[in-house]
Amino acid sequence: YGSPGHYNLFESLMSGRDIYSLEDDCPPPDDARRKIFQAQLIKDWAMAHQLKHLVDSCPPEDVFLVLAGKAHLTHYHGVPEIYSWLQRADGKDDDPSDQLLVCASMMYEIDLDERNDKENDEVAERTILASEVVRGSLFGEGAGGSFEKPVADVLYVYDEEDWSDGEDNEEEGSDTDASDAVKKETIEAYDKVGSTAATPGNVRKARAILTYLGYTEEEQAVIGDQDIYNYQGVGNPFLLANIKKGDHVIDLGSGLGVDSFVAAHYVGNEGEVLGIDIAKKEVKHANTRGENRGVSSFVTFQHGDIEKLNDVESDSFDVAISNGAFCLAPSKEKAFASVYRVLKPGGRMSICTTTVRKNLDVETQWPLCMKMFVQLDKIKPICEAIGFKNVKVDLSDSDLEFELEGVTEEDFDDANDKSGREKIHVGSSEFKHLEGYDMNDLCARVVVCGEK
């Protein structure tokens, strides 16, 4: 047995439903996850029973530290709630003052993203207290919660990097600053895209691109007209991914969810797909689309950095796919090392990315994305040094510039696009000088495959 409040919490974590939103548009929990909730309850009852056994068998002055995920503890649901029931069933007093619940949240989860804001105590405190997550979870202002108790007695807000560490040398500090700058620019650009992703785009143009890249008619039908124009990749990871029914797949840089939905088609509801993206608004859009498509029970999207994947367990995925995100990862070594860590032994990767065939001219002004491209001849040694076996860099469809059938020049003329959709492209006047370059001679789109 589990309380209605516990199921409300559990379902929101599974579906991405924002129970802490201050708006009055939060839907009720979906009953579709009632069966899987029973698995959650088995764990909670087992933990609570073991905790009670330990407490009963130890001196009364002993103190116990219980570490568990949010679905097992927050709002005093799960283990604390069941422990209280067991105490009362045993005729013992349940004294809340004997318990202290601490919940940890990272700064980005409460809209504290800017480095300067994080380092300014006054600004950080003001931002934290004004956050919807804090107001909704800790102060009970959320529209979808209706919890009897706040998310925790103490909300511990932390960051994963310590910028105040002065032991790094000047060169390392410079590299960190450059990496932060790249990620900040990437987040800002793709959050803009996410904010207009619900606006319909050019389906004909999108189908022409995906057809050229080798997406089958079946895969394009799975994507559907409501999502196909939100494709953001540089290739087709499914040509070499060999995804099977029941597989657990992680999509790194999942964007607006297009490839994740194709992966979901292959794994079925016996499998799992987890999308990771650095742009929160794209993550939010993808979760909404997953809900609308009815696949959110086994397809979820989380905010994260592909160079770290701190919230993803090791050895947990059969397949890792990516379609363009590695282009903008400042450290390819860290990104591929993250892939290796989260794959199960024998797991495989299919990573679509763009490379440079030769060194870029230092006197030429290049767009940020091209400056981040890894050199073609370095990518295989990087993967092999990490531990990947049978590494292959597929160049069978490597052209950066190509002709498309079934579309006109007007389809690619932004002046004709009145939709208001934000886009990522190089077509600004500051890069007009690149029109004389042969991009197919300079760059190559590749698919990097390997096994753990």
Image (cartoon, rainbow, N blue to C red):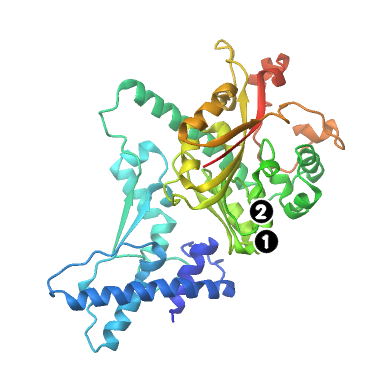
Give the vertical position of 304 relative to 408 (above or below).
Answer: below
Check residue 293 in the rendering and tell me which mark sits there, or answer none: 1
Give the vertical position of 176 relative to 124 (above or below).
Answer: above
Horizontal side, residue 229 vs residue 50: left or right: right
Give the vertical position of 391 relative to 67 (above or below).
Answer: above
Depth check, front residue: 450 or 225: 450
Depth check, front residue: 392 or 321: 392
Q: Which residue is mark 2?
A: 261
Check residue 58 in the rendering and tell me which mark sits there, or answer none: none
Q: Give the Cα distance between marks 1 and 2.
A: 9 Å
Q: Are marks 1 and 2 in contact (CB under 8 Å)?
A: yes
Q: Quadrant of residue 374?
A: top right
Residue name at image x 65 percent, y 58 percent: 245
Look at the numbered disc 2 and give the secondary structure of its residue. Answer: helix
Residue 293 is situated, as x and y percent measured from the top left of the image, at 67, 61
Horizontal side, residue 42 vs residue 358: left or right: left
Look at the numbered disc 1 and give the secondary structure of its residue. Answer: helix
Residue name at image x 81 percent, y 36 percent: 411
Residue 439 is situated, as x and y percent measured from the top left of the image, at 70, 20
Depth check, front residue: 3 or 335: 335
Q: For the residue marked with disc 2, what is the amino acid?
A: Phe
Q: For the residue marked with disc 1, what is the amino acid?
A: Arg
